[in-house]
Image: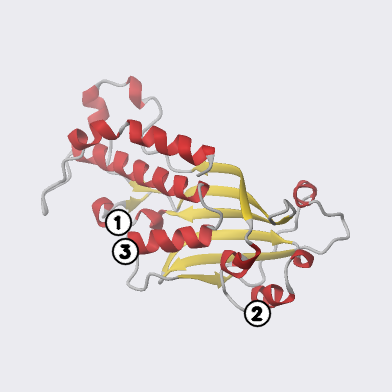
Amino acid sequence: MRPAARTTLTALCAGAACWPALSSAQPPGEATTPATSYVRRLEGALLLQTLNAELLSHDSASVTLQHWCEAHHLASSARITAERVHEADKPITDIQRQRLRIGAADAVRYRRVRLRCGTVTLSEADNWYVPARLTPQMNQLLESTDTPFGIVVQPLHFQRHTIAAEVLWQALPEGWEMTPPAAADAVSEPCFPAQVLQHRALLTLPDGTPFSEVVETYTSSVLSVPRLAPAHSC
């Protein structure tokens, strides 16, 4: 497990001792009280940090989402598929070329996909990759099919190096820790924005040669578990 993920999980586990006291489930059919709204926000934040730690500790986001989809029953058909967004284009920047260790004349391909669990979109991914560093068969699959990138290049035994990881949803209002308990309990029912988490990462071959840079933006559907439902959109 990578140090960043280990640190995140340690922080989460440190708070686990107080969790049973906070997390009293709301009886079915009863209205949500301010206190349970507060708890549901914390539960959503914990679930999102758990996914964040899983992504940081594994090399393939596609495989991680497959396990997440299965474990949380997010769709009747718990299989990750990639829906290609055709005619999308984002030119590679000079900084990205430096990270990929390629010159201005080297070919780069761009691929944008929506990763789905059944019919539920869990993330949208922008991918810039160097075709010369993949096999002909991999390039053919990436060009002609909707197979997730991480699945296609899995035989390379690649490594993932996170450049940035940003949580896009703030569970509690800024300064909540300085407010009186009664005011903290009065926070509104949780709402999730369309996008809740974003990762930027570099994929490298076992010898350290980079071949892809990806930006993955995760939707609020990754939190669509019964305990947090129904949470409305912000």
- Mark 1 lies on a secondary structure that is loop
- Three-letter code, disc 3: His
Measure the alpha-carbon separation of dots 3 and 2: 30 Å
Number of callouts: 3
Q: Residues within 10 Å of mark 3 (few under 14, many from 20)?
A: some
Q: Earlier in the sequence, mark 2 or mark 1?
A: 2
Q: Position of residue 171 (x, y in %)?
A: 37, 38
Instruction: Verify CB contact (< 8 Å) between mark 1 and mark 3.
Output: yes
The type of residue carrying mark 1 is Val
Determine the residue positioned at 71% across, 61% down.
129
Query: In the image, residue 142 lies at what x, y percent?
Result: 65, 73
Residue 73, which numbered label? 3
Q: Which residue is mark 2?
A: 144
Q: Is residue 188 left or right of residue 208?
A: left
Tell me the crowding category of disc 1: few under 14, some 14 to 19, or many 20 or more residues within 10 angstroms, Cα based. Answer: some
Q: Which mark is residue 225?
A: 1
